Image: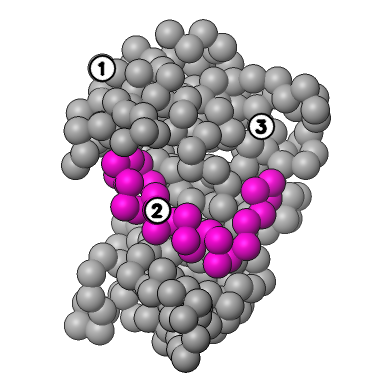
Amino acid sequence: MSTQVPRLLAGLVDDAAVFPPGSASLPDAVTAHHQHRASWYADLVGPLLVPASAADTLTDLTSQTGQTDQTDQADQAAGFEVGLIGDTGIARLPAALTRLAAGGLVVRQVEVAVARRGEDPQPGLTELLRIAGDHPDREPARSEGPAVAWYAELPLTFGLSAALDTLAEARAADVPIAAKFRTGGLAAELFPTPVELAAVICACRDRDLPFKLTAGLHHAVRHLDPETGFTHHGFGNVLAATLAAAADAEVDVVAALLADTDALRLVEPARAARDADRPLWVGFGSCSVREPLTDLIRLGLVNGGFDR
């Protein structure tokens, strides 16, 4: 573990460079991800997130030969872990996983929405659990290395509690699946309130259920985006709130931390827990790895600088 990145922050930020608003090209994202993996802050960075719709393109980067620039791209695309985002739906996940495996890519996590807002998540969740249960990593003799981690993205509406119960039961049966929630987007209703997000965090705590977050977590501290008028959650707020929830705080206490805009109050819990494993919260994807890293450096939670 790096002396610059504390244990608490290990793997906190997945590299979502190809997703909006960054929208980097896949070759550029692959090149940049290699740079992140070779940097002094590598311990902060999770896998490169790629949409299932780009599985063929990414595999082509690993298999092209004959031209110097293509060979360089292949060298860059091989040898690191990816997270697959199921933008083509649950049913097409096995084909995308097979394609990536054939190209020599190591998939460490799969994330997919199991329902739209207002839909019952149980049918999609049942389908995803079937695919996760049938995946080769469920049979140790047929796999090498850590199992693929599966994340079911759940809408924060109808059927949420029952879906969390289903996930907890599956984990108790040794299926490596957990929850994922959206914390932002292009519409106001995609930003949960502090109370709503606190209730979800505590619900996961009560079920010993890890979770991931996606969208809107651009900075460490809760803030208003002047361009959109949306108030964004801060990932530092989420970290402090999750630490409190893991210590059995009630929903109102967790919600207060999520709503706080005082950086100093948010930093202290994280600094006190810097040498511990991060509880519950697996992490989040960011289209810019350097934006959250810059905030962490400014807050004194990561000891480093870009001149290293």
The residue sitting at the bottom extreme is: 66
- Mark 1 vs mark 3, foreground winner is 1
Name the amino acid type tagged 2: Gln
* Real-space Cα separation, disc 3 to disc 2, in angstroms: 34 Å
In the picture of the structure, the residue carrying the numbered disc 2 is: 35
The one of 37 and 47 positioned closer to us in this rendering = 37
Tell me where the magenta segment starts and ends, as one range: 20-45
The residue sitting at the front extreme is: 68
State the quadrant of the N terminus: top left
Residue 282 coordinates in the image, percent (x, y): 39, 44
**Residue 234's image quarter?**
top right
Q: Mark number for residue 124?
A: none
Q: Is residue 180 visible?
A: no
- Dot 3 alpha-carbon crowd within 10 angstroms: few under 14, some 14 to 19, many 20 or more: some
**Residue 300's image quarter?**
top left
Horizontally, residue 149 falls left or right of residue 222, namely left
| 245 relative to 130, above or below | above
The residue sitting at 73% across, 50% down in the picture is: 117
Q: Is residue 202 magenta?
A: no
In the rendered structure, which disc, 2 or 1, sits on the residue that comes first in sequence? 2
- Dot 2 alpha-carbon crowd within 10 angstroms: few under 14, some 14 to 19, many 20 or more: few
Name the amino acid type tagged 3: Pro
In the picture of the structure, the residue carrying the numbered disc 1 is: 272
In the rendered structure, which disc, 3 or 2, sits on the residue that comes first in sequence? 2
- Circle 1 — which element? helix
Pointer 3 with pointer 2, Cβ within 8 A: no
